[in-house]
Amino acid sequence: MKYKLYLERISFKEARDYIENSSEEVYYVDPGYKIFKDYYIIGVPPVAMGVRGKEMLFTFVKPCHGTFVMGIDSEEEIARLRENEKEKMKRSLKKGAMKDEKRSQHLPISFNKIYEN
């Protein structure tokens, strides 16, 4: 695969900031997200992946050399990323709504209610 190397030997935060500022679309994936069938994205959450035109921007960690920001043209991988994120967001919204409802039922009404017997 032909790739472009944008930044090298940087921190995860610097990589995330670069991807957020340089991309038209930004997706946040969990560490271990699989790309190009054989490669896993690793890093400190939230791990940003960006889309700029037909190019996907992502972090690549090379042991003993640090973190790099790379870009690869891949419309197929971008489509897969968009589809996975769409499904992931629907699931998380449903789970979040259920948790918020349960949480609101058990919250005390006032500070004094906390110490009531």
Image: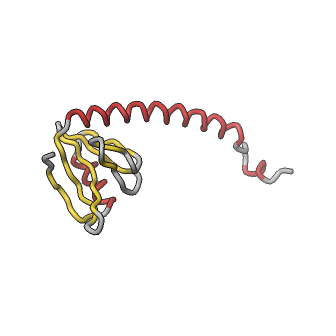
Task: Say whether residue 46 is left or right of residue 95.
Answer: left
**Residue at (34%, 44%) from the top-left corner?**
34
Residue 89 higher or lower than 19, as above or below: above
Q: Position of residue 30 (x, y in %)?
A: 41, 47
Where is residue 31 shown, x and y percent of the image?
Answer: 40, 50
Question: Measured from the top left, where is residue 78 in percent x and y?
Answer: 25, 36
Residue name at image x 80 percent, y 54 percent: 115
Q: Is residue 8 above or below residue 16?
A: below
Identify which residue, 38 or 50, lies in the foreground: 38
Quick check: 8 left or right of 41? left
Q: Is residue 69 left or right of residue 4?
A: right
Residue 24 x, y percent position in the rendering: 23, 40
28, 110: nearer the viewer: 28
Q: Residue furthest right?
A: 117
Q: How is the image coloured?
A: secondary structure
Which residue is most to the front? Answer: 38
Q: Is residue 107 left or right of residue 5?
A: right
Which residue is located at x 14 percent, y 51 percent?
4
Q: Residue at x 25, y 67 (%)?
A: 65
Image quarter of residue 42? bottom left
